[in-house]
Amino acid sequence: MRRIVLAAVLLTGNAPAALLRIEIASQTDVLGGATFGTVGSYQLVRGRAYFAVNPKSPANSRITDITFATRNAAGLVEFSADVVLLRPKDPHAGNNTLLLESPNRGGIGILALYNRAAGSPSPVKAEHFGDGYLLREGYTLAWVGWQHDIPAREDLLRAYLPIAKGVDGLVRGEFTFSTVADRIPLGDANHLAYPVADPAKLSLTVRESIHANRHPVPPTEWHLNGDAIVLKHPAKPGLTYEFIYPGAQPVVAGLGMAATRDFVSHLKREGRVRFALGVGTSQSAMFLRALLYEGFNADEQGKPVFDGLQPHVAGGRKTTFERFTQPSRTSGPYRNASFSTTDQFPYSDTETVEPMTGRRDSLLSRARTAKVVPKIIYTNSSYEYYGSAASLLHTTLDGKHDLPLPATTRLYLLTGGQHGPAPFPPKYGPGQYLHNWNDYKWALRATLHNLRTWVVDGIPPPPSLYPTLADGTLTPGKPAAYRTQYLDFGPSYLINGVITRQPPKPGPDYAVLVTTLAADGNETSGLRMPWVAEPLGVFTGWNLRSAAIGAAGELLGQTGSFLPYPPERINARYRSPAIYRSQVQTAAERLVKNRLLLSEDLPAILRLSGQAWEWVAELPSSERFEPNTNLRQGLK
């Protein structure tokens, strides 16, 4: 594998202290030099970027434990990160816009999201580039590793960050069994575990459900084997185990934000692109919210980094970079961690007050002070209102008042969607109902187009579409919706990011609100894809765990449902396939007119609608569902 200093390729002039150099591992023409519209051919560049930052700079003051990192002779902290660039070979042929995706657990996702491509961590084949949308538009695409605990695989992007020397702290994790098994990993397939400093001080508890009482598991019932706890007797599905131990080798994880900041800042300063947009999905969207909140949208010279952001399906969560952080352990129902730092105040772009502490804060507080507030478009599926406290983006913590959105923010509910659309036709999984096939990814292409137009041309996007208290489209979530509450991690947590209390002491709950339902069982607000506006069934943001995986009837993480209507309801509404197709086309054309879909995508959208009609028509009666006003009674 060749290593070439990239100065002759990307750098012009002297690199600032923040970016020392970039080394190329490979540089290839995409698909043998294939052309993409008028932009022409693209190059795929893989390499590693090397950085050095001043730990005393105010721009880096929010990085937990940076003062405990080793410094070089100049007093700077050095680190590096994997980088990937997908750029037009002719630098003048592109659209002058960088589109950076913060990797989700080290992976590349936006080609599948926007290009309708087959997902791949190492795109090389035609199917990995899909219909080429982002390339035809002329974007320069980039990925920068930010997460330190990614498994060491060549196709995953990670950051190589220093250890905080001479400090200690607690590591906490959870594991919920979905099968009969006897091993509890301290990490998982997505992230590596911190070493255990003292195995004798590792504690293990078990509980019947996320918020049930903890019961200690005696040390005679388990033993530590490498990076896993082995139970003496296999556990039944649905039980949640929690382990806490003194950790070793804490990483200065917040430098991952500095890597993204300084790489994007360099590309803009170097002049190959003028504008920078940041996109992310789920965990990587949480990272973008953290970068914004922690003040990293200003570089070390105080200049703006991202001009626009599109965080997708983050809900009210954001990544946190406390000592012994585990970025892959995101909050949610029966998924890795309850009592998590990732769903804590502040949630919204509008300033609010946290009653327990009296803090006034917003996600944009530091960006406003630095005058680097980007244009932001948030997109969330209906699931995020059940599983990720998305309503706290636009309501007060008590759920009694709507919050006004800043002029620089748009917010869209992707009505009746789950965290990531299921393939069509839908199937049963670990839930009680069919997965939700509502393919809202078509709308994300239009949303990205609107974000760039907003940033580059100053043309505002369409108005926000989300449920509100004022119009009666928000209602309290049932208890099965994910519980969000104030958590006390100890007196030093809010000061310097050091947790001294694990598990945290829970405080008052915050209001979790969800969208009200129409008589047909579907939600009453948001951006409705044509098959939701003209439904053949109910699209929900929730599904329930089946008895096979334990904790039956509890909310299933990241998953919605599709509940097909009986034939008589469909026939009464549409009377014929031709009428259905006509009404779906009208709904789709309305979205195009309102700039919420792209006209070039209409044929594919209408084809999917037709396939849905034919598929639903063949379903047996046992698969049908008659909606009523008590639809949510399935949720406890």
Image: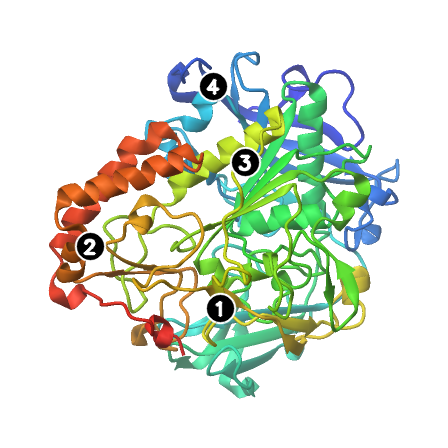
Q: Residues within 10 Å of mark 3 (few under 14, many from 20)?
A: many
* Disc on the earlier residue, 4 or 2: 4
Residue 137, given in percent of the width and then of the height, sits at 47, 23
* Disc on the earlier residue, 4 or 3: 4
Q: Amino acid at mark 2?
A: Arg
Q: SS class of the residue under badge 1?
A: strand
* Disc on the earlier residue, 1 or 2: 1
Compared with 143, 533 (above or below) is below
Q: Is residue 402 left or right of residue 53?
A: left
* Disc on the earlier residue, 3 or 1: 3
Residue topped by disc 2? 573
Residue at the (50%, 39%) spot, across then down: 154
Residue topped by disc 4? 42
* Disc on the earlier residue, 3 or 2: 3
Q: Quadrant of the C terminus?
A: bottom left
Q: Residues within 10 Å of mark 4 (few under 14, many from 20)?
A: many
Residue topped by disc 3? 461
User: Marks 3 and 2: CB-CB under 8 Å?
Assistant: no
Name which quarter of the figure residue 264 lies in.
top right
Residue 601's label in the rendered image is none
Residue topped by disc 1? 475
